[in-house]
Image: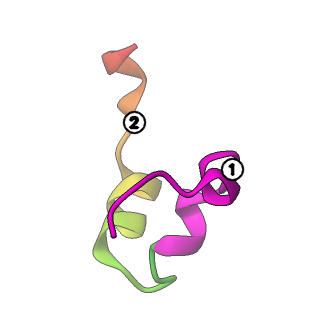
C-alpha cells in the first residue's frame, strides 16, 4: 500500500560530493588545472 512513511519523512542525508567522484577521475584533473573564478 502506498503512503507516507513518517519515520523516513524526517530523515536528512548529508553527502560530500568529493566523496562521490573517484580520485583518478578526469574532472579532478580539469578542476586542478582550470581557474573557474571567472564564473563567479
Q: Position of residue 15 (x, y in %)?
A: 62, 59
Assign a secondary structure to mark 2: loop
Name the residue located 51 percent from the left edge and 82 percent from the top edge: 23
Q: Residue at coordinates 40% horizontally, 13% vertically from top-left?
A: 40
- Does the segment drawn in magenta span residue 5? yes
Q: From the viewer's perspective, is the residue at label 1 or at label 2 nearer?
A: 1
Note whether 20 is above or below 38 in the view shown.
Answer: below
Q: Secondary structure at mark 1?
A: loop
- Dividing the picture into quadrants, the one containing residue 8 is bottom right
Q: Does the residue at mark 1 contact the one at mark 2 (Cβ under 8 Å)? A: no
Could you tell whether 22 is left or right of 38 in the image? right
Nearer-N-terminus badge (1/2): 1
Q: Residues within 10 Å of mark 2 (few under 14, many from 20)?
A: few
Q: Identify the residue at image location x=59%, y=72%.
A: 19
* Local crowd size for mark 1, using a 10 Å CA cut-off: few (<14), some (14–19), many (≥20): few
Residues 2 and 35: in front is: 2
Residue 12: which disc? 1
Residue closest to the far top: 40
Give the x, y percent position of residue 39: 32, 19
Q: Which mark is residue 23?
A: none
- The secondary structure that most of the magenta stretch takes on is loop
Residue 31, image x, y percentages: 40, 54
In the displayed structure, does residue 34 sit left or right of residue 21? left
The residue closer to the viewer here, 26 or 6, is: 6
> Residue 37 magenta-drawn?
no
For the record, the magenta segment spans: 1-20
Query: Which residue is farthest front?
Result: 1
Question: In the figure, residue 33 lies in which quadrant?
Answer: bottom left
In the image, 9 versus 15, the foreground residue is 9
| Quadrant housing the N terminus | bottom left
For label 2, the residue is 35
In percent of width and height, residue 16 lies at: 63, 59
Amino acid at each position: 500500500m502506498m503512503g507516507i512513511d513518517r519515520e523516513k519523512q524526517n530523515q536528512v542525508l548529508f553527502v560530500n560530493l568529493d566523496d562521490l567522484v573517484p580520485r583518478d577521475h578526469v574532472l579532478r584533473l580539469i578542476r586542478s588545472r582550470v581557474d573557474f573564478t571567472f564564473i563567479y
